[in-house]
Image (tube, coloured by chain):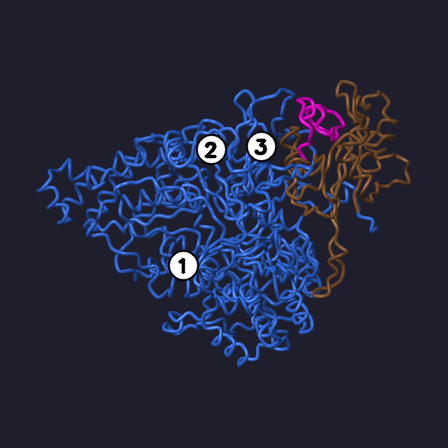
Chain colours: A blue, B brown
Amino acid sequence: MKIIETSRRKFLQGSVALCVYATSSFSSPIFTTKTSDKKVKDIPYLCNMCRNKCAGFARVENGTLTKLNPNQYFPKSRNMLCPKGNAGIQALYDSDRLKYPLIRIGERGDGRYKRVTWDEANEYIKDKLLKIIDEQKDNRSTVAYCNGEGFNKDEYIKFFGSKLGSANFLDEGSICLNTKLGATQLTIGDIGEMDVAGSDYMIISGANRYESLITPDSVDMIHAKQKLIVLDPRCTMTAIKADEYLPLHPGTDLAFCLSMIYIALKEELYDKAYVKKYFQDFDKLQKHILKNKYTAQWAEEKSHISAEKIERITREFFAASHPLYYLGRRSVWSANDFQLRRAMVLINALAGSINRKGGIIFGKPFRLKEEEITEPFYNNAEGRFDLDGIVYGSQKGGSWLNFREKVINQTAPYTVKVLFVRKHNIMQNMPNITKTKKMLTMMDLVVVLDTMPSDTAMMADVILPECTYLEREDMVVSFNRLEPSLALRNRVLAPLYESKTMQDILKGLGKKLSTPLFEISSKYDEDLQDAIKEQGKTKAFNEGGYNLAELYKDDISTRNKKLILTQFDENVYVSLKTKGVWHPYIENQKNLGNDLYEYYPEDKRFYTVQKKYKVNCFLKKLQKYGFDAMPTWHDRYDFKPAKDSFRVITGRYVTSTQTATTNNMMLKDMKETNRLWINAQVAKKLEIEEDDYVIVTSSVSSVVLQAYPTNKIAPQVVWFAHGFGATAQELTNAFGKGASDNMIIEDKFEKIYGCATMHETDVNIRKL
Amino acid sequence: MARYGMALDYKNCINCKACEVACKEENGVELGAEKHRIWVGGNNPEGQWPLLDIASAAFLPSQCQQCDEAPCEEVCPTHATYYDENGVVRVDADKCILCSYCMNACPYDARYVDDRTMTVDKCTFCSDTRLARGETTTACQNTCPTKVRTFGDLDDPNSEISELLRTREHFSLKSHLGTNPKLFYLT
């Protein structure tokens, strides 16, 4: 047994926070509200500190939220709350929160705003918007709108897309995981779900599941009896906890995958019966891979992983009964990312790990009915342009970098003058912040709905304070495929200050805008003019669906009850209101001990379902547009940073979610700033010591942060966590802490899904 | 009356700090790294990239070890530190004179000064919060994503913790000091 230092003092040595929080008789202690010894009724809610939506119970004492606890009924979150989930209280009580509607009175970005009433804010938006839409002759797509939060996204789209008529919606997909979703959809006809718990042999490329927690995957990995192989240029917590860690060059995971396919084909390790039944164009794949000689020796040269290991792991993988090549999430690293994810899907398929335990499963999710609304048709609304030049692309969330490029270069087919932003910190979340700033400066009207004065909010003309997830009820949501369940976010407290739910904000805007916007349409839209002639104005308005607030006639509680009772029954409704969750086995969940539960009995889980699908090896459309129809290596993918320069890669700390949590006082207490990981031996040569300030320079810009020399990273690679380096002074905890990765990442994007490739920037490092 | 203890399946710890945050929120612990009742000690893998020995890295969740023979209790001149009816080492804020003998005596460095109550405070196993209202888990145990901790009554032969300690190998920290901790690390 190795002796590990358990001393608090030792622990403190590495803590940057020490000097800041050093006990001083002059500073008053900061603390949270202790829970009492009294029993209270806990309120079930769903977390929103990251994209996971774990379930919890909130403890409210005398009107104050004092504690958030995990919810044992939700199959997805496995009865846990992570550090961020626990710190949700401080998101609610953050003193920097946006409290009132604000209108800009200074220059854009200088932070001068005046407090206004909701009506004044809506009136201001109305005046500006009407003028612009009139000028643009009812081209509704002059209004772009974006949203970075999963919950309520569809309702937001219904308002600005279906009702108001804009084609220009953007979301986080093109700076996150659209290549992975697309690769899976196009290869096996479904985005599927990975059954981590059921897998006995799992390979993870780069996805850092123990520091970027995804439920239930992160939890299941710890408890599953499985061999775990981790590939990463950086020795992450996930790598440390693996059975085997394979350090490799950034961007060369595809070489490893191609070699796995080569070995499987050459040694005939693949599931022949499965391939015969499901594969399309298998012969083409076979010919392509063998012809290109993607041998283990070849992959060793590219990736730095030894040929012996590649061969052994490939054989082990195909010999396992439930192997899984984990597809990752925030996935877009390199230009080859789409074909990398395809290669991973094909490896799973070659092993027969599709639609069965431990593989990519299709499952049987609950399909909730859509609430029906009437959508007006606008003849003068133009289509979206951000997918021009993109082969597939997401018709829903588009391509942020292509959109921004076309706006700032004025190469879009029409002008975008307005941007509505909800919970989407675009000033921090996409590469090359200077360009985002330029785009925002070119807008005539920027409206931000958010809870915090983010860097983006501080670029707005109008700021509308939304309440946090703890102050609202949301529509019931269906989760997961293997063990499907329903979950409902109940309201814990009424909205603080003058903040409102998104629905109430849109309802207010809808009331203000519907009629005047209808008038503009009637000026330019011939079909509408005909309808008015035929039916009269009132009927044309009502039957045409021009009431933007139609969905908000009833409040969320009423809508939820109606929806749940129509599709399910009273028991389900009561369960959702009292437990926050419903699944068919909720009343007889088996306690496995130590706060762990079995949700669906093994024989009731949807490992395998009846489904017609094919495994598509060859995508003709790609060939038609001059791209690789199958996963292929090109020399330009080789890892060759210039002499004395480093490839910068990004990721997260376990205590922060993108930029939304770095102002949280409790999470700041855990991790106050980010530091630059640099190989210890390299740092020594450069005379860089721990906590020295270094300047990191790319072709785009430069940032300054402290150094963390470590043996856990490759010599020609540096890493620092995303989420820090806020420039908004209104974020008193986050401002001035660390550096922002997107300040220096070059804005390159791949052309299959229009996704930003985050790991293709080389930087120079200099000690300050 | 119980004799509370905790078993830690420490190899499952991913140092995510959920326990630290849950503890601070539940017990109203002051912020600041010096004030943690819980912390995770650890060491990086040995070797040089790419030849890293990942098995050499380990993370050890630490907090008050709830000794049966607690040095902090022995040295306390005012009997502010005491064992409660469940064997939990507690502090009586009214009696504490902040002499800090306990801080020096504790071999685990588990005690810290609470600037509000002017008490040398420590982990209480959530005795005055969760346990006082009849709950059976501590905040750190309940929230843990990988379920490292098992909390329970060591005197109850049917408790989960008793069963675990019967069936799994375990060790205590600095056992040579004879402090008899009630925190057990499972191997």
Picture residue at 43% right of the left edge, 62% below the top? A186
Q: Which residue is mark 2?
A: A572
Lower position in the chain sequence, tag 2 or tag 1: 1
Identify the image quadrant of residue B155.
top right
Lower position in the chain sequence, tag 1 or tag 3: 3
Q: Which residue is mark 1?
A: A401
Look at the picture and state if A102 lies above or below A248: above
Assign a secondary structure to mark 2.
helix
In the image, the segment drawn in magenta is B113-140
Percent of width and height locating residue A331: 51, 58
Evaluate if marks 1 and 3 touch, with contact meaning CB atoms under 8 Å apart. no
Identify the image quadrant of residue A552.
top left
Evaluate if marks 2 and 3 touch, with contact meaning CB atoms under 8 Å apart. no
Lower position in the chain sequence, tag 2 or tag 3: 3
Amino acid type assigned to the residue bearing label 3 in the image? Leu
Spatial CA span between label 1 and label 3: 38 Å
Whether the magenta-drawn stretch holds residue B132 is answered as: yes
